[in-house]
Amino acid sequence: MDNVVVLYKQLKTEWIKSPINLKLCGSLLDKLKIALTELSYLPTSNSPASQQELVIARDVLEIGVEYSVATKNIPAFERYISQLKCYYYDYKNEIGESKNKYQLLGLNLLFLLSQNRVAEFHTELELLPADIIQENEYIRHPLALEQYLMEGRYNKIFAAKGNAPAESYNFFTDILLQTVRDEIGACLESSYERVSVQEAAKRLNLKSKDEVKQFAEKKGWKLNADGFYHFISELAKPKEPIPSRELAEQAIFYARELEMIV
C-alpha cells in the first residue's frame, strides 16, 4: 500500500503542473494500474477494500479518463470511464461523491453523442437525478447539443464549442462538429446544383478557403474554373413532363363521383 500511495501522490503532483508532462503521467498511470491490482482495484464481495484504497483507485481512474482525452486515445477513454462508473454508482456510500463526478459523466455523454450512440446516451442520462440533469452545467451541455442535433440546429452546435464547461470537452466536440459538417455537406450535394467556395465556407462554418478545399477534397468535390463546386451528375435522368391534362381529368372524375355519393 505504501508504494501505491507514493505513486499516487506523484501522479497528482505531476497532473496539476502546467504544462503537463504527459509521457511521465502515462508511465505513472501504468505503474499504478499494476500496483492497484495487488490491492482491491475492483473489489468484490470476497475481497473487501478499505476506504483509502477505493478513493485512490477512483482518483487514479479520473486522471486516467482525462489523460486519455489529452492523448486522444478513445479506446483507453472507454476503459477508464467504464471502470470509474463502478466507483461513482456502487461505492458512493463508502467513499462519498467525487467533485469531478458530473464533469466526467458529462464528458462521457458527449463522447457517446460524438459517436452517434444515441441510445446509450439516453441510457446513461437515465442514471442521473432529475435535478442534476436540469441544473448541472456539465450535464446540460451535452444534453443541449443532443437537442440541437435532433432539431437540425447546426449553427447552435458550432457556437457551443466556445461555451464548453471544461477544456477536455473540446476533443469530442471537434469530432461531433466533423460529423455535423459531413451531414451538411451531404445536404449541399442533394439540395444545390452548385455552390461557391464562399457559400460553402458559410454553410460549413469554416473560416478560410483552404479549410473548404480540404473538406471538399475529402468529399470528392471538384472545383470548376468558374469558382463553383458543381453537384449535378452528368448521367442525370431527363425530367419527365408532368401529365397535367390526365391529372385534371382524373380530379374532375373523382369530384363527380363524390357529388353523386353525397
Image (cartoon, rainbow, N blue to C red):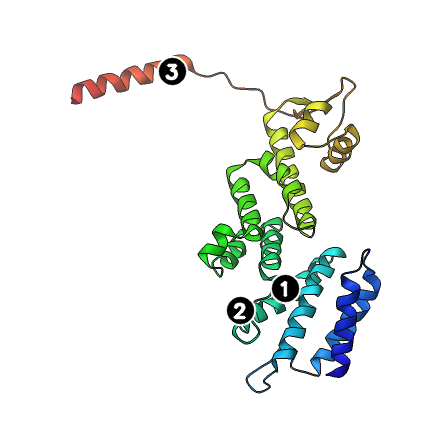
Q: Give the Cα distance between marks 2 and 1.
A: 12 Å
Depth check, mark 2 against mark 1: the one in front is 2
Q: Nearer the viewer, residue 129 or 223?
A: 129
Q: Amino acid at mark 1?
A: Ile
The reply to whether dot 3 and dot 1 touch (C-beta < 8 Å) is no
Circle on res. 12? none
Whichever of labels 3 and 2 marks the residue nearer the N terminus, that label is 2
Q: Say what amino acid the circle numbered 3 marks.
A: Glu
Q: Nearer the viewer, residue 261 or 24?
A: 24
Relative to residue 103, is residue 52 depicted above or below?
A: below
Q: Is residue 31 above or below residue 102?
A: below
Q: Secondary structure at mark 1?
A: helix
Mark 2 residue type: Tyr
Where is residue 39? Give x, y as percent. 68, 83
How dense is the environment of label 2, judged by Cα within 10 Å: few (below 14), some, or many (20 and up)? Answer: few
Q: Residue 81, labelled with which disc? A: 1
Q: Please state if 241 lies on the left or on the right of 176 as rendered.
A: left
Give the answer, above or below, for where 225 lies relative to 29.
above
**Separation of marks 3 and 2 at Cα, in angstroms:** 68 Å
| Residue 17 on image: x %, y % | 80, 60
> Distance between the Cα atoms at labels 3 and 1?
64 Å
Q: What residue is shown at x 57% (from left), y 82% (from top)?
A: 44
Check disc 2 and report the residue beneath it: 89
Residue that extends furthest to the bottom in the rendered view of this protein: 46
Q: Residue drawn 67% across and 22% down?
A: 194
In which quarter of the view is residue 257 placed?
top left
In the displayed structure, would residue 115 be above or below residue 33? Answer: above
Instruction: Please tell me which residue is depicted at 55% across the width and 52% down the height of the picture.
Output: 139
Question: In which quarter of the view is residue 46 placed?
Answer: bottom right
Tell me the residue that label 3 is attached to: 246
- Circle 3: element type: helix
